[in-house]
Amino acid sequence: MQHHLSIDIETRSSVDIGKAGAYKYAQSPDFSILLFAYKWNDNPVEIVDLAQGECIPEWITQALQDPSVVKHAYNAAFEWYCLNRAGFNTPLEQWRCTMVHGLYCGYTAGLDATGKAIGLPQDKQKLAIGKALIRYFCVPCKATKTNGGRPWNQPWHDKDKWELFKEYCRQDVVTENEILQRLDRFPMPQEEEELWQMDVRMNAYGVRVDSALIAGALYIDGISSQKLTDEAVGITGLKNPNSGAQLLPWLNSRMEKPIEDIQKATIEELLDNGTGLPKNVRRMLEIRQQLGKTSIKKYVAMDDARCADERVRGLTQYYGANRTGRWAGRMVQLQNLPRNYLSTLDYARKLVKQKNYNGLKLLYGNVPDTLSQLIRTAFIPSEGHKFVVADFSAIEARVIAWLAGEQWVNEVFATHGKIYEATASQMFGVPVERIAKGNPEYSLRQKGKVATLALGYQGGEAALIRMGALDMGLTEEELPDIKNRWRQANPRIVDLWYAIDRAAVQTVQTAQPQGIKDLIFALEGDLLFGQSFLTIRLPAGRKLFYPKPFLKENKFDRPAVHYYTVGQNTRKWDVDSTYGGKLTENIVQAIARDCLAETLRRIEARGLQVVFHVHDEVIIDAPMEVTVEEICGLMAEPIPWAPGLILKGAGFESNYYMKD
C-alpha cells in the first residue's frame, strides 16, 4: 500500500539564501532545521519543535527512506536537500514537488500565489505573517546590549511569536496538501517527474567556477568604475554624474536637440548616429554606457553563490518558463549571458586573473565590455575534465516545418541545411547556389535570415524590426514585401497558425476534443474544485495547460481564447489572450524543449554529467576521452515520438565555457 507524507520545514543559516541560493545556505556550518511539520495520509498536521529539543518520531525518519511512502513538499528540492544535509537520509526518487506540478498545470510559482490562483478557501491559504517571523527566527540578528549580544533570536526570546511561527509552518503543510489534492486530478507524466529529479541532481552537483577570474574581474571593475567616475566628474563638474537627474540637464544644455532620457537604447542611438555631438558629450555618453554594464553583476552573483568547493549550485529552474515548460535561469541567470567576440580570450583571461587593469585597458580599450565578454569563461570544468558544449542547429525552424509539413524546408534540413539561403531562394525566385559570398544575390541572405527568425509565429513588420531588420540595413518600406514573400513561400506554416487557432477556439466553444497534426486539444476540469483548463497534448505525451479558459472577442473583433496567467508586465495573476501564431510558438518551443529533454536523458544514460543547459545548448563536464562528435551524434538520433523530424547538433570542446 502506498502512503503519502507532506512535509514543510523551517530552517536557519547565516548565509543569505536570496543571494547565495539554497545549496550554499544549507552547507553553512550554522545551518539547522528549527521546525518539521508533517501530514501522514489524511491525518491532521503534526509539528516537531526541533529547536526546543523535540525529535522527529522514529517511524517518520524510517518513512523518509521507505519507497512505499511518497514524500511531498512545495519546492521539494529544498526539503530533500536540507533534510539530507541535516542527517535525515531520504532518496530523491521518492519525492514529488507540488510546486513543479503547479507549474506543469499552468499555475504560478510561490505557495501563497498558487493557493490564491487555484482558489483555495481563506482558511487553507498560507499565513501572511510568515516573512516577519522568518526574519526574526531564521536570519541572524544584530548583537546589541539590549539583547545581550546574542547572534540569533531563540524560541524563548519571544514565546508568542514562536507559537505563531509553529502555526505558520503547520499551515504551509495544509496549503501544500490542499493544492496537491487539486493537482492530483491532472497528473504529471512519469517522464516529467524523472526529468525534474534529473534537474535537481544537476543543480546539486553544480558547476565549477574560476575563482581567480572572478576575483580579478571584481578588482578590475572596481578600478575601472572609479576611473570612469572620476573622468565623468572632470568632464561635467557634477557632484554625481551617475545620477540621471543631474546628467540629463547637463547633456541637453550642450546638445542641439534635447533628449528625453538617458536609457541604454537612447545612448546607443546617439553614439551610432550623432556625428555632430560635441567631443565632451560623446565621451560622457561613452562613460555612461560603460558604467551601465549591468552584466558585471553576474560576477558578484557567482561570488555570492560560490560554495566552499568552488562550485555554484542551483542555476536552473525546471519548468521555469510558464506554458512551454522550458528551463529558466536562477542566480547567475544563464539565459541572458553576454556573448563573447574577442579572438584572444585566453590572453584576456590571463590579464584579468593577474588583476592587470593597465594591460587590459591598453590591449582592449573598453574594460567593462571586455569583462562582460569574459563572464561565460568563469564557468570551468572539474579538475581533469573538459567542457563538451553542443546545441541544436535551427531547432525551432526544423520543428515548425516538421509539424506543419512544409516539405521544402524539411528537404533543406535533410540535405545542405542552409535554411537562410534556401528561404531567400524561395522568396525571391533565385537559384540557391547564386546566394553565395561574392555574388550580388548574397545580399538576399539577410532577408531570408531575418524572415526565418521573425515570421514563423504569425508576426509581421513589427516582428522583423524586433529581430533587427533595420539594424541589418533594411528599410521599413521593404518589410511588408518580405513578410508577404515569406508567407507565400511557407503556405503550410501559415495554414498551421489558423488550424491551431480554430482548434483552440472550437475546443473551448464546444468542450469537444480537436486533433490536428500530432496535437490533441481538449477542455479538462473537475467539478469538485471547479478547475478548468484548455490543454494541448504534445507528441511527447505531456500537455500544455491554459487555466480557466473562455472565449471573448479580441482587438480584431474575432473570438479568441482568453485564460489566466502571470502577466509579463504586471507579474500578477490575470487574464491574457492568445491566437494561432502565439499558440504555435508555445507548441513549437515546447516540442524543442522536449527534444532537449530527450538528449539530456541520452547523456545521463551514457553516465555523463550535464552541469547546466541554456536554451537548446547542453554543457557537459566530460572526461577527456568524450568527444563533441559523440554528443552531436546523440542529438541527431531519431526521436521515437517525432518520426521524420531531422535534428542536428553542433558544438565544441573547451577548458572554459564560451559562445563559439
Image (cartoon, rainbow, N blue to C red):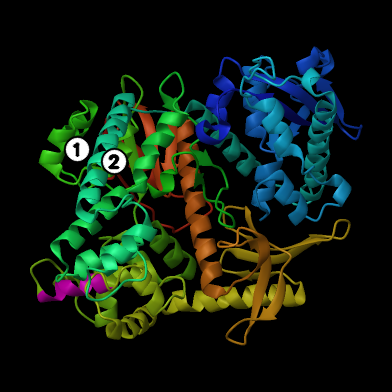
Residue 45: numbered disc? none
Magenta segment includes 60: no
Image position, residue 450 (x, y; %): 31, 70
- In this view, the residue farthest toward the left is 438
Disc 1 crowd, CA 10 A, few/some/many (<14, 14-19, 20+) = some
**The image quarter in which residue 453 lies:** bottom left
Instruction: Say which residue appears at 89% left-offset and 56% top-offset.
Output: 528
Q: Are marks 1 and 2 in contact (CB under 8 Å)?
A: yes
Q: Name the residue nearer the viewer: 401 or 470.
A: 470
Q: Amino acid at mark 1?
A: Leu
Residue 336: horizontal and vertical position, in percent? 40, 49
- Specify start and end residues of the magenta stretch as a single range: 440-447
Residue bearing mark 2: 658
231 left or right of 305 in image: left
Q: Is residue 28 above or below residue 447?
A: above
Type of residue at label 2?
Answer: Met
Question: Which is more toward the observer, 411 or 582?
Answer: 582
Q: What secondary structure prevails in the magenta region?
A: helix
**Residue beneath label 1, please?**
345
Task: Name above or below for residue 560 compared with residue 344.
Answer: below
**On the rendered structure, is 240 left or right of 279?**
right
- Percent x, y of residue 172: 78, 37
- The quarter of the picture where the C terminus appears is top left
Q: Earlier in the sequence, mark 1 or mark 2?
A: 1
Task: Give SS at disc 1.
Answer: helix
At x 68%, y 54%, the residue is: 107
Name which quarter of the figure residue 570 lies in. Answer: bottom right
Residues under labels 1 and 2: Cα distance? 9 Å
| Place of residue 316 in the rendered image (x, y in percent of width and height, measured from the top left) | 50, 40
Does the rendering let one see residue 296? Answer: yes
